[in-house]
Image: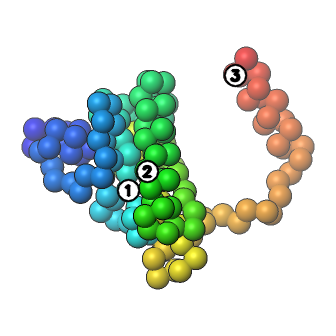
Amino acid sequence: MKHQCLFCGIVAGDIPSVKVFEDDTTYAFMDINPASDGHLLVIPKRHSKDLLEIEGEDLADVTLAAQRIAKAVVKEFGADGVNLLNCCGADAWQTVFHFHLHVIPRYVDKTKDRLVLPWQPGMGGDKATMAALGDRLAAAIS
């Protein structure tokens, strides 16, 4: 294989994909392991390993392309919602180390939608812990 990165191979045309959208900086294609009907990936053409490495310009381009595609997913497929998902690092479920955003159409009809939440929203967090972590993060960003 010419490319060590699967997604770079897809962008180069050496690995087949079902292309949905392409412009000068981004490429979008159907996910081969879809969580729902219409699940696809949006990637920068320029390689970057993950969210921590991607250039801001590429991140903006991928995000804007994902928004454009999400609008089309709702209109064309009648999706009831859309999730954008990025996994950064192996412990966060990243399996291909080329930055990508999943655009996952969501449906009330569960025959079209197999994605389930891995946690329970609305359970509430410890206020003291949230405050301490928030303060540490705010200081680190400053």
Check disc 2 and report its element: helix, strand or loop.
helix
Q: Find the distance from the CA under tag 1 to the CA under tag 2.
A: 9 Å
Name the front one of labels 3 and 2. Answer: 2
Q: Residues within 10 Å of mark 3 (few under 14, many from 20)?
A: few
Disc 3 element = helix
Contact check, label 3 and label 2, Cβ < 8 Å: no
Answer whether residue 91 is visible to the viewer in this image. no
Q: Secondary structure at mark 1?
A: strand
> How far apart are labels 3 and 2 at the CA level?
31 Å
Amino acid identity at mark 1: Leu
Task: Please state, as top left, top right, bottom left or bottom right, where the C terminus lies in the image.
Answer: top right
Q: Is residue 69 visible?
A: yes
Nearer-N-terminus badge (1/2):
1
What residue is rendered at 73% in x and 29% in y? Answer: 137
* Residue 138 pos. (x, y %): 76, 26
Judge from the rendering whether residue 57 lies leftward or rightward of residue 14; answer left or right: right
Q: Which residue is mark 1?
A: 40
CB within 8 Å, label 3 to label 1: no
Residue at 43 percent of width and 32 percent of height: 61
Kindly report which numbered mark, 3 or 1, lies closer to the viewer in this rendering: 1
Q: Position of residue 7 (x, y in %)?
A: 26, 44
- Relative placement, left or right, of 125 versus 81 is right
Q: Is 132 on the left or on the right of 23, as rendered? A: right
Q: Position of residue 6 (x, y in %)?
A: 23, 45
- Residue at image position (12%, 45%) is 14
Q: Residue furthest top?
A: 142
Q: Earlier in the sequence, mark 3 or mark 2?
A: 2
Q: Which mark is residue 69?
A: 2
Mark linked to residue 109: none
- Residue 130, quarter of the rendered image: top right
Disc 2 residue type (three-letter): Ile
Q: Which residue is mark 3?
A: 141
